[in-house]
Amino acid sequence: MEGGKGGNSYWPGFVDALTNVVIAMIFVIVVLAIALAFAAQLMGRKLAEQYIAAAAASAAAAASAPPAAPSAPVAAAAPPRMDVPVIPESKRAGRTHIPVSAADAASSPAAPRVAAVRNVLQLDFAPNALTLDAGAASTLKKELADVPRRGRVAVTARGPDMQLSANQRAAYLRVMAVRNVLIEQGFAAKDIDVRIDTRSSSAAAAVNVSFQEGAP
């Protein structure tokens, strides 16, 4: 029973080695967490700069465009009202879809073919599209030609992952681009309700324009 006496014990050395490994792993995890936090901040800043640059480019293009025919004055862009309910669609069935490509895309698609307005217009935006390209704007104006300039209009933006602030900013730029076209075509700014739907999520970014029938 004296085999353990006087012999070398490896247990203290094993505990020291295991402790050093655990400390090294904790250090690596802390470094990775700090690096991820900085990377997330940089990505958020770059996304915000891209949205601001796109909005500035759109404003510059609109300023350099030739003056259009006289129409109702364009009101200042108001912040989106989150408490405005979506106006229900009328009994007329159907929905008109207008595809919207990115303004800076390498090639723009052919003019979209759409049916007549049936109370609801849906503009399907490309993932990187924040404003209306020339084809989509022209198609939207044609669809609005026979719509009475009375009653209220609801402009609602939807898209994927609307809980993220970056996606909400992109939705705001899209809904305001559609609102400006409506005002340019003679709709009263006070009768246009804009809304960003943050409670639901859709597969693709879209802006719905719903017309309420009858007088306001």
Image: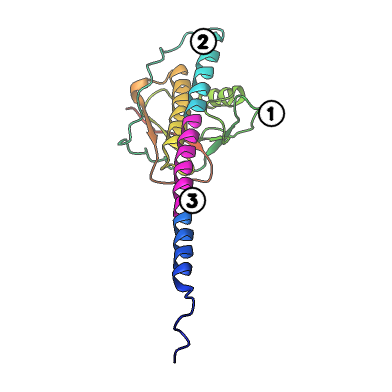
Magenta segment, principal secondary structure? helix
| Dot 3: element | helix
Residue 153 location, x and y as percent?
A: 39, 30
Q: Nearer the viewer, residue 47 or 1?
A: 1
Q: Mark 3 to mark 1: distance in Å?
A: 53 Å
Image quarter for residue 84?
top left
Amino acid type, label 1: Ala
Q: Is residue 200 above or below residue 112?
A: below
Residue type, label 3: Val
Q: Which mark is residue 60?
A: none
| Residues under numbered marks 2 and 1 in contact, where contact means CB atoms less than 8 Å apart | no
Q: Name the residue located 48 percent from the left edge and 42 percent from the top edge.
A: 35
Magenta span includes 215: no
3 or 1: tag closer to the N-terminus? 3
Q: Quadrant of the C terminus?
A: top left
Question: How far is mark 2 from mark 1, CA to CA?
Answer: 25 Å
Circle on res. 63: 2
Across and down, in percent, residue 137 comes to 56, 23
